Image (cartoon, helix red, strand yellow):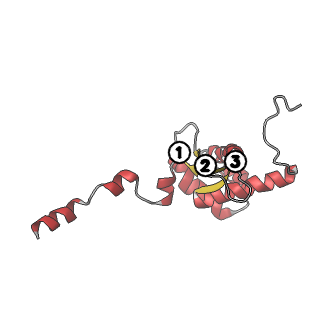
Amino acid sequence: MRHRKSGRKFNRTPAHRKAMFRNMARALIMHGRIRTTEAKAKELRGVVEKLVTIALRNDLHARRQIYQVLENHGLVKKLFDEIAPLYQGVPGGYTRTLKFSLPRPGDAAPLALVEFTKYSALAGGKSSEETQKPEEGSAAVAKKE
């Protein structure tokens, strides 16, 4: 019986599970959002939330702890310099999981999108409010002509 046993096994060995979540965490930090199955997305949240929480400390020991997981100096730098400052003073909830309406073709696995809650700031794109407002200068120039 699995009473009070936390975590999903995904029919993988512990080493394989660790490698899978390590790779998924790297991809999420690199791209800001990834598409995966719902179950993997729910498990990945805990891994990434812990990494961001450690990164908020912003000291040498925290960098070394993060490097043990990510094994990439560039990703460690991105996590500390770009992602963690966005969440300064935020007590948690650094990621969100959005479920897709259609399953994956082939095996009908339910899909989900995992992204950082402040993905728009990470992507460098404009927010939805900024994209809907017309530019004041261009409207005034068009009326005068």
**Front position among marks 3 and 2:** 3
Residue that badge 1 annotates:
87
Between tags 1 and 3, which lies in front?
3
Q: Is residue 67 visible?
A: no
The answer to whether residue 15 is left or right of residue 63 is right
Q: Say whether residue 24 is left or right of residue 3.
A: left
Q: How far from the left and from the top, in percent, is residue 108?
A: 71, 53
Q: Secondary structure at mark 2?
A: loop
Q: Earlier in the sequence, mark 1 or mark 3?
A: 3
Find disc 3 in the rendering and name its residue. Answer: 44
Q: Up-down: is 11 above or below 6?
A: below
Quadrant in which the N terminus is drawn? top right
Q: How far, Cα to Cα, is label 1 from label 3? A: 18 Å
Give the alpha-carbon distance from disc 3 to disc 2, as whole Å.
22 Å
- What is the quadrant of residue 7 in the picture? top right
Image disc number at residue 107: none
Residue ranking furthest to the left: 144
The numbered mark, 1 or 2, whose residue comes first in the sequence reads 2
Quadrant (top left/top right/bottom left/bottom right) for the C terminus: bottom left
Residue named by callout 2: 58
**Residue, x 53% and y 47% (percent of image)?**
117
Q: Looking at the image, which residue sits at the far bottom?
A: 145
Name the secondary structure under disc 3.
helix
Q: Name which residue type carries label 3.
A: Leu
Q: Is residue 129 visible?
A: yes
Amino acid type, residue under disc 1 in the picture: Tyr
Q: CA distance from mark 1 to mark 2?
A: 12 Å
